[in-house]
Amino acid sequence: MSDRDWKSSYDSEDGDRLAKPKAILARIFGDGENPLAWGFTIFTIKGIRVRIHLLFIVYLLSELIFTLPGNQEGFVFVWPRLLAMIILVLAHEFGHCIACRRIGGQANEIMLWPLGGLAMCTVPEDWKSELKVAFAGPMMNLLLIPFFAVPLYLLTGTASSLAFNPMTLGASASELVLTSGQATWWLEVIRAFYSINMVLIVFNLCVPMYPMDSARILQAVLWRKRSQSKSMFLTVNIGIGVATVLGLLGMFVFDDGKFLLAIAIFGGIVCSIEKRRLEFLQYGQMIPGLSSEGEAWKTGSTENNATLVDEDDEEIVPQGELDRILSKISDTGIESLSRKDRRTLKRATESSRKSE
């Protein structure tokens, strides 16, 4: 996607003593209307901005705080998993970004979430490109398996060290020890990287639900035989069904189903947002600028300086402004629109209805 404009209505004019705090809040929350974008930039590499969501920060702090009670997992078991999650999710998302750029697309942002990451990629519009970029993330994790599984097996001398509970990300019931019988903290670090890496592979390749990569892979495969719009609608509906099933399993089947339930809720929300975006774009064919069939509309000039006018030659919305809003919806969803964008779009839609 293109770089977001983080300035908002909260930015102040010269002389405002709250200018700096407001600017900081604007960089974190934008216009405040898109919760998916609330976060901090932690670093930028090769033009890719890496951000961490506010919920992820809360999650990390809560996980560390829960290590304090005596009846919970200790710090030595928890911090390796948190570290592994951050590093492996970054590797996964950079896989998407690298693949996207190699085939001529754009990738300039990664957002770290409590349940994974999101790479903001603009992929060339064909099913092969979509499939390559979608599979690149899991492929990165697949390539990392030997680096964790082989040392873990050789150091412990038992295949049971490779077993773990994906619901809690815990390992086998017995404590890991070296072949000499000695327990060591760095063995837990290796196991944490191994288990987190395997969970990322399983969920991204076996759960066809957005934002998992398997949903994007499924959509690309369906796109080969259907139109892009139909393949996306079908994938979203499948994802909502999968989220429902996972939620029921997490609540009623598995005793340690909290993680599965969290995945289901998050996936269900993302699929619902994506479905609303698709429905909006489908409905938006009646909006001038998205379709060339509106006979009641005409332009006063050409290209980005064009202005939409109604049948009474009354200026309504600049064509360039409407194109920008529609492009923003396509890239980041309708939830990313500012109040001003929403007002502009509403005015264009109402005018279009009157012209029919």
Image (cartoon, rainbow, N blue to C red):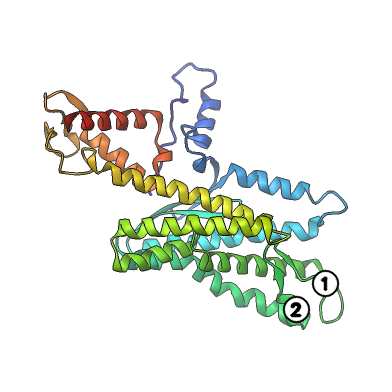
Above or below residue 142? Residue 276 is above
Query: 14 or 73, which is in the foreground?
Result: 73
Q: Quadrant of residue 235?
A: bottom left
Q: In this image, 122 relative to 192: left or right?
A: left
Residue at left offset 67%, top offset 68%: 195
Q: In this image, 260 relative to 211: left or right?
A: right
* Quarter of the C terminus within the rendering: top left
On the image, the x and y values in percent for residue 74 come to 82, 56
Query: 278 or 69, which is in the foreground?
Result: 278
On the image, the x and y values in percent for residue 279 come to 35, 46
Above or below residue 325? Residue 145 is below
Residue at left offset 80%, top offset 66%: 185
Q: In this image, 280 relative to 89: left or right?
A: left
Q: Quadrant of residue 300?
A: top left
Query: 102 or 44, which is in the foreground?
Result: 102
Q: Which residue is mark 1?
A: 174
Cβ–Cβ under 8 Å for marks 2 and 1: yes
On the image, the x and y values in percent for residue 209 come to 49, 59
Above or below residue 120? Residue 132 is below
What's the residue type where badge 2 is placed?
A: Ser
Residue at disc 2, secondary structure: helix
Q: Which residue is mark 2?
A: 160
What's the residue type where badge 1 is placed?
A: Ser
Instruction: For label 1, count other residues whose C-alpha is less than 10 Å away and answer few (under 14), some (14-19) or many (20+).
Output: few
Residue at left offset 85%, top offset 49%: 69
**Mark 2 → mark 1, Cα distance in angstroms:** 9 Å
Q: Residue furthest top?
A: 15
- Disc on the earlier residue, 2 or 1: 2
Query: 248 or 284, which is in the foreground?
Result: 248
